[in-house]
Image (cartoon, rainbow, N blue to C red):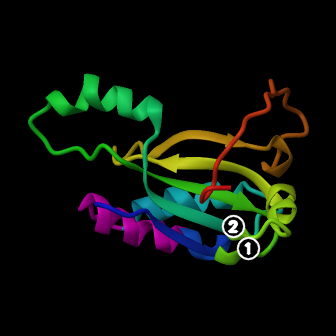
Amino acid sequence: MNTIDGYILSIEDLPEFIESKYLEYFNRNSKGEVKKIIQNLVNNLSDIKYVYFEYPYVEKIYRDTYYNFFSTKHKEYHKNCMRIALFSMPIENEDFRSREKKAKLVDSFHGVFTIRPTYPYILGWNLISPKNIVGTSELTFCSKKYKFLINGV
C-alpha cells in the first residue's frame, strides 16, 4: 500500500462505511457486528456531524502490541489501523490545503478514535472531547491538550 485512503463523510454514514472498509482492508466479515459497535459509539457522541476517515494509520500502542504479540501467532493479523477524526461542521478536502480555512478545521475538531483489526475488540486508542460524549455531566475527567495532524494539518 503506497497511499493513504482519506474519506469525508457524515457521522450517520460511518457505521455502514466502517463495516464495508473492515471487510475490504482486514478481510473480515463481521456479519454486521462492526456496524453495531460503531453505531453504539456514534449514538453516544453529540454535536459531531462529519468525520475524516484515513487508512492505513499507525497506532503506536497497537503497533507495539502487534510486533510483540500478534505477529508471533499462526494467524494473519494486520498491522495497520483505521483512524476517524471527528468534526462538528462540514469539511471538504480543500479545507486541509487552505490557510484561511485552517481555523475552521481547528474550531470544529473534537477528537479521534481508531479501529483495530482485532475483531471483536476493534475500538482502539481514542481521544474525544468530553463535551462531545453523551451522559458525562456526572463524570470527572482528567484532561490533557494533545496535538494532532489530520490530513497534514
Taking the view exactly as shown, the residue that stands out farthest to the left is 74
Element at label 1: loop
- Residue 51 magenta-highlighted: no
Residue 136 picture location, percent across and down: 84, 40
In the image, is 22 to the left or to the right of 98?
Answer: left
Rendering quarter of residue 151:
bottom right
Element at label 2: helix
Tell me, yes or no, if residue 143 can be seen here: yes
Which residue is located at x 58 percent, y 57 percent? 84
In the image, is 57 to the left or to the right of 100?
Answer: left
- The stretch of residues the image draws in magenta is 15-31
Rendering quarter of residue 109:
bottom right
Does 14 appear above or below 120?
below
Q: Main secondary structure of the magenta part?
A: helix
The mark lying in front, picked from 1 and 2, is: 2
**Residue on which disc 1 sits:** 91
Q: Nearer the viewer, residue 76 or 79?
A: 79
- Mark 1: amino acid: Ile
**Residue on which disc 2 sits:** 96
Which residue is located at x 79 percent, y 28 percent? 144
Considering only order in the chain, which callout, 2 or 1, is on the residue closer to the N terminus?
Answer: 1
